[in-house]
Image: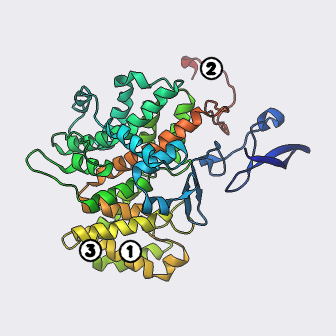
Amino acid sequence: MADTTKTATLSIDGQNYELPVLSPTAGPDVIDIRKLYGQAGVFTYDPGFTSTASTDSTITFIDGGKGELLHRGYPIDQLAGKSHYLEVCYLLLYGELPTAAQLEDFESRVTNHTMLHEQMMNFFRGFRRDAHPMAIMVGVVGAMSAFYHDSTDINDPWQREVASIRLIAKMPTIAAMAYKYHIGQPFVYPRNNLDYASNFLNMCFSVPAEDYQPSPILARAMDRIFTLHADHEQNASTSTVRLASSSGANPFACIAAGIACLWGPAHGGANQACLEMLREIGTVDRIPEYIARAKDKDDPFRLMGFGHRVYKNFDPRATVMKESADEVLDLLGVENNPVLQVAKELEAAALADPYFAEKKLFPNVDFYSGIILEAMGFPTSMFTPIFALSRTVGWISQWKEQLSDPQLKIGRPRQLYMGSTARDYIDIEDR
């Protein structure tokens, strides 16, 4: 329970109002304004909710000034370096790291739910062949509520648990099938003898005509991408899931809403934008030109994949992702890929330039994840679906936490109305 011993005084037209100040376990204090409208008849104004706490949570904490990201108190670099995605899923869902027996049981439950209802294959085929994979994912995840009726009752704890496992288990299958459908190849069914990341790579890249063996290095890099994107506090898509959930919507509809929000280029499309920038640069010899443009205040060009809105120091996920990027590029090489050549040289140039160090414009997680996915052979259209697959467990964890909150109310932001005041209707012949 947050400390409520402190108060803040708000003065409006000579009238003072005492507002409780809540002190969290970490982060800045929060002024509680829940009763402000009832007491003073005013709203607060905060476009983008940049200074507003919409909920209390015990899942993820970010300190942008320190470059810190904690899941249930554990630093992300430790989790990404020592753990793996499904163990992090367990941590986010249940609050503690699992024992060996608990992890084995959890992994078994996820593995045994990776297949999709067979009738859903017909649903995929209703899309045009050139449909964007994110469009397919939004539709298919939303349609899960039509195929899995036994896990849509949000008031039943067991159904909430079943829905959670199903979404984590089936999201790689849905993303891989969206990819296969997009490129015109046959669907590949999941295999229970592969780990989570290897199974996803197999569903994406194997074909019936030949054997495919996922590389352990690529599988590890894929697992790290999943882990580093698992949750990121109350971002736009997570807030969307929570807002949809506050209405009592079923879990599949809530996660589909999160996917739709993530699809926006300002949210989930950052690594795609980074790759498009690298393609625009084109060749290594043009890097100095673009570095100069990035420094020019009068030039609208910005280096994508450098810096972060939340992290004012460095992105703690980027260090781990860089290790994976280096391993993947060592394995696959960059000699025949000009985009990857540009990425390596741009990274080195930016890190060596005092301008970027002073402004703390370090390569972020999107820069390195884009490099890895490009090297693996994924088209940019699959970058955001992979992000959605990774973030599913975060959305579910936030959804479950919200449903257990005794203070849960349907989300209803207020507004600063600037339109016309009341006026009489004018008959059409008099206008």
Q: Residue 208, image x and y in percent?
A: 11, 44
* Contact between labelled residues 3 and 1, with CB atoms less than 8 Å apart: no
232 and 425: which one is in front?
Answer: 232
Q: Is residue 276 visible?
A: no
Q: Which badge, 1 or 2, comes first in the chain's sequence? A: 1
Which mark, by number, is residue 283? 3
The span from disc 1 to disc 3 (Cα, nearest Å) is: 14 Å
Label 1 sits on residue: 347
Q: Residue 393, image x and y in percent?
A: 45, 43
Q: Residue 30, image x and y in percent?
A: 73, 50
Q: Is residue 61 visible?
A: yes
Q: Nearer the viewer, mark 1 or mark 2?
A: 1
Q: If the image is split into quadrants, where does the N terminus sit?
A: top right
Q: If the image is split into quadrants, where does the C terminus sit?
A: top right
391 left or right of 21? left
Which mark, by number, is residue 54? none
Callout 2: helix, strand or loop?
A: loop
Q: Residue at x 55, y 45 (%)?
A: 95
Occupied quadrant, residue 55: top right
Give, as a three-letter code, the residue at label 3. Answer: Thr
Label 2 sits on residue: 425
Residue 401 vs 265, above or below: the answer is above
